[in-house]
Each structure stands twice: as structure tokens, then as C-alpha cells.
Amino acid sequence: MVKQSEQIITKKTLDQSKCHPELVEGYSSLYQEVTLRQAKCDNKFLRNDEFHFERREKSVFFISSGFLSRAILRNDRTKNSKSLIIADKLYLLFFLISITLLLLNGCANQLPPGGGEVDKIPPEIIYSYPENGTVNYKGDFIELEFSEYVDKRSFKEALFISPSIDEQPEINWSGKSVEIFFPDGLRDSVTYVVTIGTDVVDVNNKNRMTSSYSFSFATGDKIDKRNVTGNVYGKDIEGALIFAYKFSFDTTNYLTKKPDYISQIGKDGSYKLNGLAESVYRIFAIKDQLRDFKYQADQDLIGIPFEDVTLIGSDSSFVGLNFFLSDIDTITPKLISAVMTDSNHILVTLSEECDTSILHANNYFIIDSTSNSKLNVEYCYKGNSKKDEFILVQTNKLNPADSYYLFAKKLLDLSDNISENDFRELIVSEKPDTTVPQIFKTNPAKNTAVDFLNPEIIFYFDDALQNKQIKDAIQFEDTLKNKIPFRLSFLDDATLVIKPIINLKPDRHYQIKLNLSKIIDASDNKTDSVYTFKFATISGIEFTGLSGKIKTNLENVVIVLQNNKTPDLSYKTKPDKTSTYNFTRIQPGSYSLWYFSDRDSTEIYDYGYPYPFRYSDEFYFVKDTVKLPPRWSVTDFDIIQK
């Protein structure tokens, strides 16, 4: 590829050089006549310029064009028209040959050599132009060279230029080299940061770059060196991007436009935004599925900042702007369908999973549009339905010839989006309800060990239970037939919770018997049998613990101990007035330790919200994994915020 950087050699420079007096004055493309030898003679040429000359002189097009231009000049001197005609023909011939050879060479360069061992070496960038830290750059392109052939599409998706370029750059390949050309040029007095992310893969075996590559240059006389660093956490963080916007003191929804600065996180979740100009920034972490550099709430994951970043005056860096990637749901839930599976049960389907607070019968009613009357719903429960479904029970006799509508007073999803007074037509059935209620799940499972302190046994029925006063249908005892007093409660109309009033003894066996003949559904269905649930208590010595002091500037701190193998297994605690924290009765295993500022005092981490904007809670992770062995508590594990 002929490098556009060669054009920095001006006519004035050539005239002043004593190394190339043979150049003809007045020739319009003088820079093409400069040879590698001549470039080396001129002290003003840098090493990179010599590199470009060397590559250019090896090209067929340069050799042929040099020959032809000299032939034309000779003919111009002699004014020989016959020679001029011959030269023109030679020029055309060599031009066609050169173009053909270049095309063949270009085509050959698209494929890696075949055969040999399996390629396990990741690609890397071995050359970039302009050099990192270059100032007063006047070019309109940048150039990179890889160590091997890479997939062009993966490169395009991994190329990030900050600040963002309005016009789409042109990308031109020649073998392992790529040139990125900016048709509208670059802005004056701006520091540009070019980052090639780890999504780049080689052609031969799809090996990914092990680390991102970044360099910066300025079109002015200085490089902006302000930066922001931090980490991104979550289940699906690979390929996440960092979007930085210059802050405006208004109600701007930044996420509807492209960011001013972009960076990509590393494999370990860390990131660094370099080359930032003096300003205040609002920064987000985005898992941009479409790579359109805009946040799409229905498909992108997002991390909300806990504060805006000020990089003004002496504040040249910000350390520890961390993000939790999460799925922010901004769509209100809706009723999708309401279908009666028999004369009593209504299977309700929602647009998404909703909060369990909506599972109570008073939240729903039926309208008979024929008689314009309102009918009550008796029971509501989750049962063994899908996550976006639940079941209602009504005992009214409905006429299939009439029109009925099911109304929901309020629907609340897991992101606190609310819809009110939604309704759907009810599909009526006259099929009788003859199915007896059964237990389809327990928590914990049968014949497992539980903690003897404050245990809770949950029984999940597949139908609503008509008689809530069923305590006399339950027996709770140990193996010596000693009665265990207990409390009875319901999570919904089909989920029964039993908790002993007294602490159980360690390393003992217990059983709960349910007389199912006394447990009936809305249609008086029941079964004449006894369900026996057996379990044991653990000794307690298998537990582990963790304690120490925490030193942090955060207020109202909550410390979280999260199991690495089972993330849903986590423990929380708050330090006392002496900054001492203590986790007790912890399951052995490998854990991550992190802490956050509980600004709303709910002891629940707040992920923030994109629009209307709400900051997240500030948080930090302890770098080292905490390994907690059984029967042994780890003490003096101090947490120090750096």
C-alpha cells in the first residue's frame, strides 16, 4: 500500500535537500520521486518515514510509475513527438500490468497459508501510525499492521475512536495492514484515542486478541492525559463498552445519542478511559448488542454510575468508578390472556414475570358485560405455573354464551414498573374441577439437612387451599414423638409455611405429617392420605465464619459475602460502631466480598435507573477471593478502601 504519510515531503523540502539534485523542477508529483536513499540522507525524515519509503519502493506500482515518469520527462526535454507516442503506449502498458499485479497480490493477501499445525497464537498489532503521543498531527488517516491475517468484520466491530467521529471512516485493507481514512478530516486541537478491542480474531483459527491495543495522538500541540478507571461486574460482562458523555446541567437523556468517548473493558472487567478533555462527565457501562453506540433498553445491559466525574484543573484522574451490569426493564407489565382450564380455575398469562405482591385475590375481579355485574375472585396462587403465569380461582357459575372480562387493579414487575386497571377477555369453560390438591415441591427437599436455628419448611401445593384453619391437620415431632410447637402462614393461597416456635436441636431427625383428608380445594376435592416430610438438622460445627474491621469513607455500609459457585447464596451484615463486621453460620466455600453505601437504608443494592436518571449505590469489591474452610472461622480479615 502506498502510504499517504509520504505526502508530508513538500517541494520546499526537496529543493533544500542536497541529496537529490537530479529532480526536475516543476514536476507536479515531486514527492513520488523521493527514494529511500534520498530519505535517509535528509535528517528531517524520521524512522517511520523511512519505513514507509521502503515499503513503497518494493511495490510494483512505484517501480513502474518511476520508470514511466522518467521516460515522460526525457521525452519532454527532447520534444520528440514520436518518442512521446511510444512513451504513452509504454505508460498504458505498464499501468495495466501494475494494476493487474496489484490486484493479484491483494487477492493473494486475503488468505492465510494452509497446512501445518493448528494455529493457537492470538493476533497482535505490531505497528501503528501515527506513533503514540504524536502532537500536531495533520493527516487524515491512521494505519495499523497485525502480526497475522485477521477477520475484517471482527476488526470493524472492535475499532473504537474517541472522541467519536461524525462521518463513518473508510477502512482499506492490504494483507495484514489496514488504513482508516477520515473523509471529513479530524478536528483541530483535539486528542484522539484509538482502541482496538479484544473482539479481533485471526482468519486461520478465530484466535482472539489477548488484550486491547490503544494509542493516542493530538491534532493540537498537547495531549490530553486525563483518565478514568474502574471495573465492571455482572454475569455477562464480556464485550461491554464504556460510554462517556460531557455533562450538561439539564434534563438531557444522554443515552439517546452517541457518546463523546468510548472504551472497551478487558477480560477481567477492568477498563481505562484515556485522553479525556477537561470537563465533567456522566459515564455508563453498556453491553451494546447492536454495536450502534446507543442504549436500547429492551436488549442492552447497563451499568449506572454512582456519581458524575469531574476532571477540571488539577483533577486529572478518577479511580474506582465501578459498575454492575443489569437488565433495566422500562416496560410496564400487561395482561396477555385469561383462559379458564375448568369451571373454577383461570390461567393468567402476563407479558413478563411480576412481583409476588400481586398474588392476592382482591387484586382481581370479573365483569359480566352482558348483565353489567361485577364478580369476585376467591383465590390467587403461583402453583406449578411458568414464571410469567399464575392461577386464579372463582366459584361463580359462568355462562359461556355471555361475555366476561378479567380486570387487574395493579400489576407490578420486578423492576417496579406498574400498570393499572388492565383487562382481557375471559375464555369460559364448563369443565368440572375434579382434581385433588397435591404437593409438588418442598423447600428444603425431603431427607435433607437444615440449620437447627430458625428453620423454615415450605410446602408448595398445585391448587388453592380452601380451609386456612388446618393446623390440626399437621403434626410436627421428633423421632421420640415429642411434639414441636410451630407457627403456620401462607405465601399465597397454595403455599404453606411452617416454622418451629422453639429452636431445634442439632444433629437430630424430625418429621412433619400432613393429613391431606383435611386439606381441601375450592371444589371440596381432597385425598384420603398422609404426607410425611422427614428432615435432619446439622450439627453446626460444619459452619464457618468471617470477621474483621472495615476502613472506608462510605456511609451506612452494608457488606455482602457472595458464594462464587452459587451466586444466589449470599450473606449480608453491617459493621458496628467500632467498624467491626462479623459473618457467622456461613456455608463453607469460596466467596467474593464487596460492600456498598446503602443510601436508602433498605439493605438492598440500588442499581440506579437510566431515565429519569437515578444514581446507583457506590460499591467496591475486595480484590482477593475469600476461602472459608468448614469448622474454622477466618478472623482479622480487614477491608481497606484504597
Image (cartoon, grey):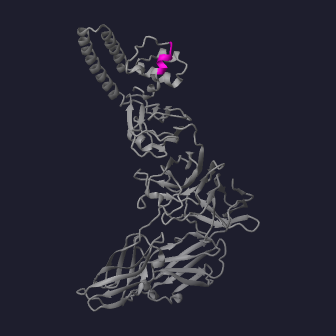
Whole-percent x, y for residue 232 in the image: 55, 53
Looking at the image, which is closer to me, 356 or 145?
A: 145
Whole-percent x, y for residue 6 in the image: 44, 25
Q: Is residue 550 visible?
A: yes
Whole-percent x, y for residue 396 in the image: 33, 90
Whole-percent x, y for residue 340 in the image: 31, 80
Residue at left offset 71%, top offset 64%: 581
Horizontal side, residue 485 vs residue 204: left or right: right
User: Of helix, strand and loop, which mostly describes the magenta segment?
Assistant: helix
Looking at the image, which is closer to me, 99 or 206?
A: 99
Looking at the image, which is closer to me, 507 or 397?
A: 397
Q: Is residue 212 visible?
A: no
Residue 584 highlighted magenta (yes or no) = no
Q: Is residue 323 above or below residue 472?
A: above
Q: Is residue 562 above or below residue 410?
A: above
Per the rendered image, the range of residues in magenta is 12-18
Horizontal side, residue 615 vs residue 528: left or right: right
